[in-house]
Image (spheres, grey):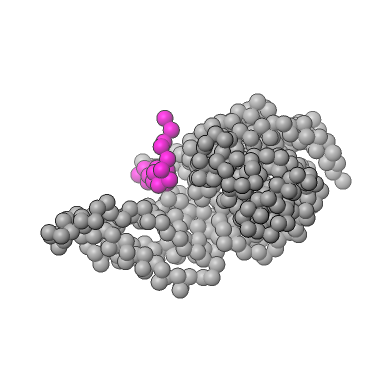
Amino acid sequence: MTDYGQLEHEVDAVEGLIWDVASHVWEYAELGYKEYKSSSYVCEALEQQGFAISERGIGGLETSWVATSGNGGPCLGFLVEFDALPNLGNDTVPRRAAAKSGHPDGHGCGHNLIASSSLGAAIALKNQIEKSKIPGTIKVFGCPAEEMLNGKNYMASAGAFSGVDVCLHNHPAMVNTVWNFHSTASIDLWVEWQGLAAHAGVAPWEGRSAVHAMEIFLVAVNMMREQMLPQARLHYQILDGGKAVNVIPDHAKVLVRYRGPSAADVMKYKSWLLDIARGAALCTQTKEVVTNLGGIYDCLPNDVLAECMSSHMNRYFPIQWADEEQAFARSIQKEMGKPEDGLATTVMPVPTGVEVGGSSDVGDVSWLIPTMGALYSAWPLHIPPHQWGCTACHGMSIGRKATHQAAKVMAATGLDVLTNSALLQAVKAEFTKQLNGRTYRSLNDSPVNLSSSLDDAERHQYDCCIHAAIEHFGIQEHN
């Protein structure tokens, strides 16, 4: 039977570093694609602890990287995220209050804790296997822009996860459990129409309205909802609807996100959306242009790996919260009009057969290699993510305790994977069972294995998708 005491000691030994990273990333609160300081800080911390940065700028994403330690044996991956959300800057107080720095953005989904938990687990496990001479390789993946549902999909397309046997991730939540549910696949389409401008009063017949095309498109996609599966979701955001009321608008633009239960379903409805965009253009004598900003897969469960991780969730959770921490949580609940039940004090059983409507780019990784995540209490019960109440908790003692214990869960699960060959074989067999003969093909407009094999036209198409995603989210590219 494995003795986890030494591994716990290794995590405890870097607890200060874990919180240092979490605190800095929380303060930086950088949006996806421009997490320059956050990415560098995590990367440098790993280098200082003996990891080598083997790759940077993967898939055209500046803030992506891979840090590697070890040689031979099974290869274990840890996923790091570090992007924040807009307009969630909050102080560490149980009410909505601007961050002391005045920074408008914040970690309402706790990606600062995701970064620190994965970092802490990777460093502790590296130190343990070196001292115990356990064969194994650890790779830590710096993954940008998860909040934009982009990042790991482009990294997967670039072959970043090749050769990894198992990948582990984590996410703060309101409960304690493991990420063993099936999420939705998703795709983002940027649909534009180009028409012809004209004076709306003097000679409207000389123009062709791009806004009319967009209106027809939106009416049609709303009619499409009746033919969507119950698990599917459709959202859209109007980005350009003309600049002046007395000018026939010659340009219109809308972002459409479709979520479905599988990649095959997403591609089916993507095709339908393309037909609707084309039909709207024909109706209005305009020209449509559709850009695929990126697509992600659904997350595949792995019951064997989930049971393993759950055993460690029960070892290190629930957290023993201090009275003042529970009071802090109840104050947030009161402020938000939620039941005042404080923070979670139990660990939920392993979810099986559970469907959720949300999406994550972890899905692409889960279709390439067995993948599992720890979900752990880091904000009050009844509070959905992407709220100021979450941001506040992630910058104070609640977040500190959560990320420390989550690092232990991930490190212990990783040790099992590296040392128990029977477990690793069973995890891989379960992965094959979940795939059920299906294969991964990227939903991005690019080949699966991007490398020097790309010709100029393919590389240009791929780069255009990256740059379009960056442009959509209003981000200035880094020089």
Name which residue lies at 53% across and 48% down: 147
Name which residue lies at 55% across and 56% down: 359
Q: Is residue 52 left or right of residue 283?
A: right
Tell me, yes or no, if residue 387 can be seen here: yes
Q: Position of residue 199 (x, y in %)?
A: 16, 56
Give the mark count. Answer: 0
Q: With respect to residue 134, does 271 lie above or below?
A: below
Name which residue lies at 57% across and 51% down: 386
Q: Is residue 128 left or right of residue 261?
A: right
Quadrant where the C terminus lies? top left
Q: With respect to residue 121, does 202 lie above or below?
A: below
Q: Position of residue 221 (x, y in %)?
A: 39, 67
Name which residue lies at 77% across and 31% down: 13
Query: Of residues 56 and 321, which is closer to you in this image?
Result: 321
Tell me, yes or no, if residue 302 can be seen here: no
- What secondary structure is the stretch in magenta mostly built from? helix
Q: Which residues fall within the magenta stretch? A: 457-479
In the rendered structure, does residue 470 fall within the stretch colored magenta?
Answer: yes
